[in-house]
Image: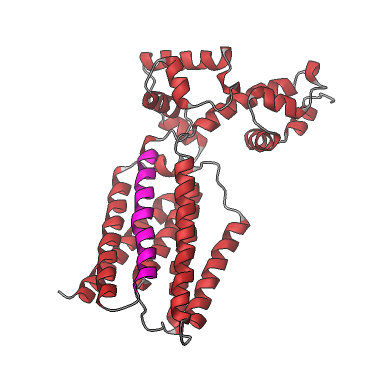
Amino acid sequence: MSLPTLDLALRAATVAMLLVLGAALLRGFSHVVTGRLALAFAIGSTAHAMTYAIGSPAPAPLWFTPVIALSTGNIVVFWLFTRALFDDTFRLRWWHAGVWLAVVAFSFVNCAILGPAAGGGARLSVIAINSLVLGFIALAIVQTVASWPADLVEGRRHIRLFIVVVAALYGGLNAVLHLAISDGAAAELANALSSVLLAAIVAAISIAMLRIEGTELFGAASAADAVTARPETNAADQRLVDALMRLMADERIYRHDNVTIGALAGKLAIPEYRLRRLINQKLGYRNFNVFLNNHRIEEAKAALADPAQAEVPVITIAMDAGFASLGPFNRAFKATTGVTPSEYRRQKGIAA
């Protein structure tokens, strides 16, 4: 079998797997933002499998240019998907769509105008697009690694490593090959190898989707579902939960700077992985920082509702509770209570 034939067969198999994966995501997780972004990523990856070509191929026909632009825009979807997957507070904003549209438009112009241009235009197009891709891959990897320590969901923590490796291996290598290879036999070999790698990655993702509980990755449909899904607490776990809550109430460790789950596990004399599992499966938290912030906000609510502290500035209450600055406190407080700290204080009839 020739390399171009192998490349075509692997592309077809990859597209078929991505369509099946997209249908499964649409059926099971279209109600949550992470599921919708995963579906969008599967669609964009289908466009990528249909269009990518290492080297300097002939200019694409104009009708095919939007598919290529959609493939390029998929790197923005990948970045947003990793944000949503690992940050339970993530919400799509209008400017996210603006970034995606800008990348898609940039790719379209490159394909429709710069690509067919004479001289070095086509090569400049390849360099510009793949430099952009490398930038978003780097951004996604940095964000994925930076938020790793606070993640309490075991299945999701394993997926982080997979995504970092895949993004660096396939996305980075593919972009570098685009920049390094112009045409000839080397381009045919690079395309075939890229197709093998992409097919293997999509197959691995499909298998993982069958083995990992969907709520671990995409979250429960509602808070009630999350509570229902928690396993029963045995006596040993209950003693640890009680000890943890006493530690939070008596020592107020959440007030300390740079509190880590490792330090908290050390105080309870248990392995870090067990404390992660305890907070996630028994208390229902998916992120360690959210667990800490909830305790901080409860203390702040009590202070804001206390007539004896009516003259105490909000920022002082926030910092006493363990927040490093006013901005994160205001955002976390409103996300939890639905009102700002000042509004909460007024609702309690406390005049500053």
* Relative image position of residue 76 (x, y in whole percent): 49, 59
Task: Say left or right for 145 vs 184.
Answer: right
Give the residue displayed 74% in from the left and 25% down from the top.
Answer: 316
* Relative image position of residue 50 (x, y in whole percent): 35, 71
* Relative image position of residue 116 (x, y in whole percent): 46, 85
**Residue 88 on the magenta segment:** no
292 vs 171: above or below = above
**Residue 164 on the magenta segment:** yes
Q: Is residue 81 visible?
A: no
Quadrant of the frame with the C terminus = top right
156 vs 133: above or below = above
| Outermost residue to the right | 351
Q: Quadrant of residue 306?
A: top right
Give the residue displayed 35% in from the left and 73% down from the top.
Answer: 53
Query: In front here: 41 or 255?
Result: 255
Q: Which residues are magenta?
A: 156-181
Task: Say left or right for 271 vs 199.
Answer: right
Quadrant of the frame with the N terminus = bottom left
Q: Main structural element of the magenta stretch: helix, strand or loop?
A: helix
Task: Say left or right for 272 vs 202.
Answer: right
Task: Say left or right for 190 vs 243.
Answer: left
